[in-house]
Amino acid sequence: MPAVHLVKALFAAALALPSVLADSDGPMVPNYEVHLQLDPTVVLNSSYSLNADVLDEFAMPDTVTEKNVQYIDTVDKALDAQGWSCRIRSIENKSGFDLTYKWRLAINNSDIDGALNTALDDGWNSGQGKYKAQVDWYLSSEELSVQRDHTASASGYSGTEEPSEQDSQSLLIDNAPKMFDDWVYSGWGTTELGSGVIYGPVLTMASAGTWNGVELDIEVWPIENAAGTGIDYLVEASFKTSNYTFASVGRTELQDLLTSKGWFLDESNSKEAMVLANYHPSS
Ligand SMILES: *[C@@H]1O[C@H](CO)[C@@H](O)[C@H](O)[C@H]1NC(C)=O
Ligand SMILES: *[C@@H]1O[C@H](CO)[C@@H](O)[C@H](O)[C@H]1NC(C)=O
Ligand SMILES: *[C@@H]1O[C@H](CO)[C@@H](O)[C@H](O)[C@H]1NC(C)=O
Ligand SMILES: *[C@@H]1O[C@H](CO)[C@@H](O)[C@H](O)[C@H]1NC(C)=O
């Protein structure tokens, strides 16, 4: 934990401050995103597209949206070690690059309020309107994330091409929000980004459909395997809601549906964690 946050945490513990202070903002209010994995050997055809049964079940068109995704961190993952990630996406038919600065915290024993209060001690509160809080609910873990998005452009790129290492550094440094930049010390984030390298890119395919009255997304991520000798296909279904009960009940219902179809994969991976683990940029 960065020194400044450690001090804040000790201070809060010593005075037993209530988590909601008078005249200040309280914990962030998250939405929920449920993530479940599908078995790639069953749901993908020989060209690694979702097969027709899956498209039909969720009323998905057979056109996909390509999203090229890369993460920037140092070779020894200094940003990740502080819970931060920086992502750059280049999306089909969308101009510019999507930049995302995201901070994460593991939720233990399903204690979402506990995590929101820990985040509050770390400086995250409901008054920070430019940041969005989300509970990412995987099969066997939950994570709180707080993220801020920007759109930025750089010249010389077309289609879903991703920016070079140097352009990636500049784009993220130029748009770095203060909470990120000053997390460990003033200018920490941009200092680390200055020696950032690319994890990825991964050219993902997204399909959007409907389930239970909400949008259901399925993404196919061809991720290099850990040995660097081939590709592992991660197929993930997800839906978002601001309603905890809907997320909780829907999660069970979706798992039951996928299981009954023979599509469910009993694994619990974050796409980003897999990319960070499997890619080994050295310069
Ligand atoms: C795989 O599925 C996609 C979409 O359903 C379809 O366009 C494509 O032709 C299929 N490929 C094969 C080899 O069956
Ligand atoms: C992107 O634009 C091309 C050309 O207009 C079109 O064929 C394609 O379907 C579009 N892709 C998406 C995901 O909308
Ligand atoms: C959950 O446990 C992990 C590992 O011990 C810890 O890093 C994290 O801070 C904990 N989360 C909360 C909200 O206390
Ligand atoms: C939340 O979802 C539950 C389960 O679907 C539903 O019964 C309830 O009415 C929803 N609450 C709100 C405020 O929409």
Image (cartoon, helix red, strand yellow):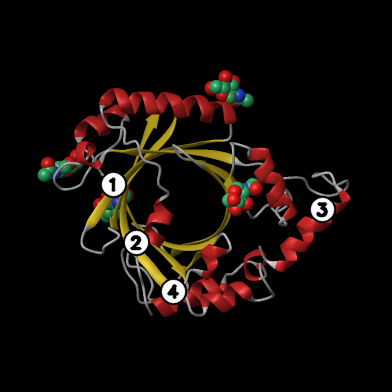
Q: Secondary structure at mark 4?
A: loop
Q: Is residue 78 visible?
A: yes
* Disc 1/disc 4 C-alpha distance (Å): 33 Å
Quarter in which the C terminus is drawn: bottom left
Q: Nearer the viewer, residue 214 or 252?
A: 252
Quarter in which the N terminus is drawn: bottom right
Label 2: few (<14), some or many (≥20) within 10 Å?
some
Q: Which residue is mark 4?
A: 75
Q: Secondary structure at mark 2?
A: helix
Instruction: Please tell me which of labels 2 and 4 falls first in the chain.
Output: 4
Confirm if mark 1 falls within 8 A of ligand 2. Answer: yes
Q: Which residue is mark 3?
A: 12
Indicate which disc residue 279 carries: none
Residue 57 left/right relative to 173? left
* Disc 2/disc 4 C-alpha distance (Å): 13 Å
Label 1: few (<14), some or many (≥20) within 10 Å?
some
Instruction: Please tell me which of labels 4 and 3 falls first in the chain.
Output: 3
Q: Secondary structure at mark 1?
A: loop
Q: Residue at x 39, y 51 (%)?
A: 271
- Dot in front, 1 or 4: 4
Q: Amino acid at mark 3?
A: Ala
Label 4: few (<14), some or many (≥20) within 10 Å?
some
Q: Which residue is mark 1?
A: 64
* Disc 1/disc 2 C-alpha distance (Å): 25 Å
Q: Residue at x 42, y 23 (%)?
A: 253
Which image quadrant for residue 46? top left
Q: Amino acid at mark 4?
A: Val
Do residues under tags 4 and 3 come within 8 Å of each other at their CB atoms?
no
Q: Nearer the viewer, residue 273 or 204?
A: 273
Instruction: Please tell me which of labels 1 and 2 falls first in the chain.
Output: 1
Instruction: Please tell me which of labels 1 and 3 falls first in the chain.
Output: 3
Q: Residue at x 72, y 62 (%)?
A: 5
